[in-house]
Image (spheres, coloured by chain):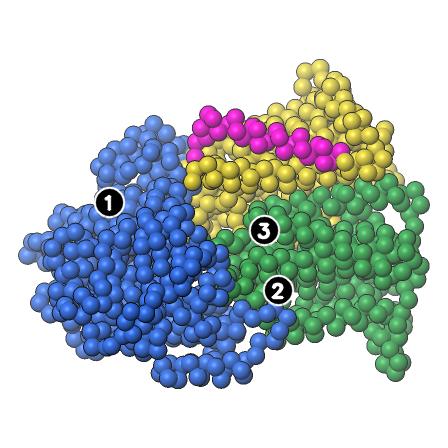
Amino acid sequence: MSGFFSETFLAALLFGAVTAAIPLLLAGLGEQMSEKAGVLNIGIEGMMITGAYLGFVGAYYSGSFWLGFLSGAAGGVAVAALMALLCVRIGLNQIVIGIALTLGFEGLTALLHHFQFSKSYPRLGAVQVTPIPLLESIPIIGPALFRQHLIVYLSIAMVGLMVWIYRRTQLGLNLQAAGDKPAALDVAGIDVIRTRTIAVLFTGGMAGLGGAFLANVGAGLFIPFITNGAGFLGIVLAMLARGRPVWVLAGALIFGVCLSMTTAAQVAGVNIPTDVIQMLPFLAVMAMLVLFGRRASLPAALGIPYERGVR
Amino acid sequence: MRATTLDASAGQTLRQDIGRRMAITVGPILVSLVLAGCVLLAVGVNPVAYYGFVIERGLLSPLGLQQTLTRMAPLLFIAAGLIVAFRAGMWNLGGDGQFLLGAVTAAASAPLLVQVLPGWLALLTAFLMATIVATVWSLVPALLRAYQGVNEIITTLMMSFLGVSLANVLVKLVFLDPGTTVPQTRTLPVADRLPRLFDTTITSGLVFGLVAIVAVHLVMTRTAFGLKLRTVGANPRAAVHAGLSVPLLTVAVFAISAALIGMGGAIDIIGVQGNVRADWNPAYGMAVIPVVFLARMNGFAAIGFVFLLSVLSIGGESAARRLGVPQTFTLVLVSIVLITLAVAEYLDHRYQQARRA
Amino acid sequence: MATTVKHPQGSPAIVKLEGVTKRFPGIVANDRVDLEIHPGEVHVLLGENGAGKSTLIGMLSGLQQPDGGRILIDGAEVAIRSPSHALSLGIGTVFQHNMLVPTLTVAQNLALGGRWWESPKISELADRVAQIAQPLGIDINLDARVSELSLGEQQQVEIVRALLRDSRLLILDEATSMLTPKGIAELGALMRRLVERGLAIVFITHKLGEAADFGDRVSVLKLGRKVGEISPERLRSLDRTALVDEIVAMMFGREAGDDAVSIPPRAANDDALLEVRDLHVSPTGDAPGLDAISFTIGHGEILGIAGIDGNGQKQLAEALAGQRAAERGSVVLAGQTLDGLDVGGRRQKGLRYLTDDRLGEGTVGSFPVSINYFLKQVGEPPLWRSGVEQRGEIGKRAEELNRQYDVRTPSIATPIGRLSGGNIQKVLIARELAEGARAVIFNKPTYGLDLANTLATRQRIRDIASQGLAVLLISTDLEELLSMCHRIAVISQGRLVGTVPNGEGAAERVGRLMIGLAA
């Protein structure tokens, strides 16, 4: 037990927490934009798994993590485009289509993976980290937080970008209006459908990127159903964060620590089946929903397709 | 977010509508088969050979057909449970967790109970225990939705992930069969399982499943209780105005829905599987959701679609072994059907509108 | 006041409608409507609910496209494709249901519509708002959140927004329906200042008095058709009474004063049938509370509740019906206390509530007419036996009610959402009057109905009172209350601020109570 709180242990714990948190952060930030604009994006799990698969394929064949992230994000956007077409443009039921996309792309990626990689099960090489000078030498925090892949810093910087978009730009206003009172946006001369489409595509890109991170950085390989509900966790984060990007970050980190602790406990020799670890984030979500569920707020027009002239 | 737009239950359908409905159901299914066939082509599998194999193994061969009918038993219970929830406007997406917990309860109790009780009573007790466990599991989302207004889509999904993991933990830690090295529960001897129908391998669970879904259909369409649930689903404010207790009905809906899905888990164990192996999760709950949508929440139509799903599922399992096409292809096919059908319905609606104007 | 101002006459029309037609499933909302809108004029578009006013402005503001006819702008034919197109043509609209985002500040709302990559230029905006608002005497707090503003303030924000966009034509849709009498007068003065600066205004209303007070030109719509127009010259030549008479003749095709005041006679024995004492309801996030509400209604008496919309009328009705929990207070019907009973229990005792939200909570639109008749009796014999629906019995009863209440429907199996408002209202009235009714709460019973249905509904209410039932009539239409109530109570911010017996001078006294003066 003496090693339990050693510096290296804590550093590893924190490092693991950040690695586990990034996909949730990206998914949560993405979903937040959809929800702000009034689209409940249940298909996010499908976007994430597609991002994970294409992200891995991209990185594996090109040998570049960056091309992997790019193709992962592009995959997410492609699924999101389907979602936007079906749910935003022609107004089909967002839940039905969301479930169909999730199931379909979980199945499709598993199928493709089977034919491509099931014999070889290839892995990617080690992740290249970009240490931040000076900061990396801080004990515990340094190795945990400042010796990460560049994409980690960029993901966290996204939080600031989102805050800026929501607070300072016309786009932020448009998104909020599209979710709270789409008719008001329409009469102000902004296309509601286009605004919501932008939001859904952004969600797809972020979810795809998150999926790619999960596969390439988190696991180093793709396995079918690897996202295992991470997209849905993103939805919960977005719901509980009530439109605040910083809260998504905080929530993602809490989940990350949760996940990382159990892994660490296992490493430390406490014998727990992996199923218990897999339960923890969901248990944490349920606890949060029981405690704060009443206060989770969603935009007024969430889930309702916009049709001009229908009040 | 409610299921109102899908609730076609209210109006009695006219005869000429039925023909059109058939057309906008069969057409998209054919289109989907072609689209999914393209996916097969892309991975180097001959779609005609694949479909032929699936139909041969799932429908035409006597043994396959019997397996298909046996597979329907749990799926019918799940479909019945989902119909109750969706018609009442509650998105119970937690079927997988409820199903597995029901299954594990039945698998943990039935092999022990048959040693002390008469066979039928042991099975009934195990069946009821499974039902109760699944019902209890649904209480958290039910109460959160009823009294706190927390979106049930999220809570049921979360509880489903939890339930699946919990079922695994129970199998590995609590109900592990000490008699074998394979991580699984004790096994219910074949002789003690539900009887088979006549001289076939078809489980009598099929009959229970059919009874359950027909009963649900009749309750939803012909009784005061069903009407109250549909009112809550179609217009919750009208339900409040009419003096219905929406929170209580909400809890009732979740309880009934989860109970039926838990029964599905139990019927699969005491009728077919006999035990639960570690990490077993057939994900029937998710697979049946599209089926219920396709059937537009009509119980009788759901029987037909559950049959199709069973054919695909049994045939797909065979194909996985023989042609090397993983079963996940079934998921792809089902979701393509769901999407094309939704699009077809939309186009039909547009066409009808244009014609009327 | 309209008659004293000099207008830039003879200026060509900004917008001209020629034979504009718009159809919806089952109805012709606008039937070959011609209209000319000139700068410097308040053009009043007068008509009852359902006359086609909203559809007409829907087409002018780009929300809907006409099925026939032409819209000319500055003499050239234009198809107004979208709201943003309408804005770019100089047509700004203030809708009846406000079009501001409640969660954004005033400044953010005004900035909506800029290019998406830009930052909203709030300080620049503040300057322009000051330039526009100050000469008009409008005071706007740009940093306030819209949800915190009164409805009148929100309307001013919307007018300023239209002016910010350089609108040449300002359309005001039912702009006075949410305003106090004082607010209405202020709006009238503001419109006058705007037209003096050369703006064109289309002012939509269903109130005769406002048309006479504010209009330079009046067009009357009835059932989708334009049935008459009064030109500025003619308008100036008439005094107010003559003008109102002429408009009434156009609208109703009958002489003024025809909408007879008829108060049903009632027996002298005045023992209270419905008695409400000290009713308190806590306010919630989106609804005002009720404070110490007390009143009694006798056998055969109609008590009116007047007030500006949103002052607790709906909460009062819901608290009485058992739909909303009361903090304290008691409700006694025919000597029996209803406290602690739920909606069903109160209904059993004879208290009935006709909701004002026919589609939102009164009916389930996708259910057949027959089931909607009995939505409050689900499970009761003989329509249900042991919980099982008796289709024959339900059908028979529904057919009977269709005849008795003159409900026009293709069949009892038709989803009720496909019926007209008038027919849906008849179904709801039939439902509330079903056996055992003793006291009936009517919440805005004629809202959105055409004239024939309005008159029929009013007569139905009088009949109910004549049979000895107690009636609580909630309405925002003072004329309606004056035409049939025995007494009128005024509700303001959740309190009854006074009760006036109907008769000579009642209108003025109720009006004074509504704006916070003693009667």
Disc 1 chain ID: C
Chain C: drawing colour = blue
Q: Which chain is yellow?
A: B
Mark 1 is surrounded, within 10 Å at the Cα level, by few (under 14), some (14 to 19) or many (20 or more) other residues, namely some
Q: Secondary structure at mark 3?
A: helix
Label 1 – label 2 distance at C-alpha:
46 Å
Disc 2 chain ID: A
The answer, for residue C106, to whether it is visible in the render is yes
Q: Which chain is green?
A: A
Q: Secondary structure at mark 1?
A: helix
* Depicted C320 relative to depicted C508: above or below: above
C442 falls in the magenta region: no
- In this rendering, position of residue B180 left or right of residue C146: right
State the image coordinates of residue C422 (x, y, percent, origin top left).
28, 46
**Residue that sits furthest to the left in the current view:** C268
State the image coordinates of residue C449 (x, y, percent, origin top left).
27, 51
Q: Amino acid at mark 2?
A: Leu
- Of residue C106 and residue C66, the one placed in the foreground of this image is C66
**Quadrant of residue C10 in the image?**
bottom left
Q: Amino acid at mark 3?
A: Arg
Q: Secondary structure at mark 2?
A: helix
Label 3 – label 2 distance at C-alpha:
27 Å
* Depicted A285 relative to depicted B344: above or below: below
Q: Which residues are magenta?
A: B10-37
Name the disc covering residue C433, or none. Answer: 1
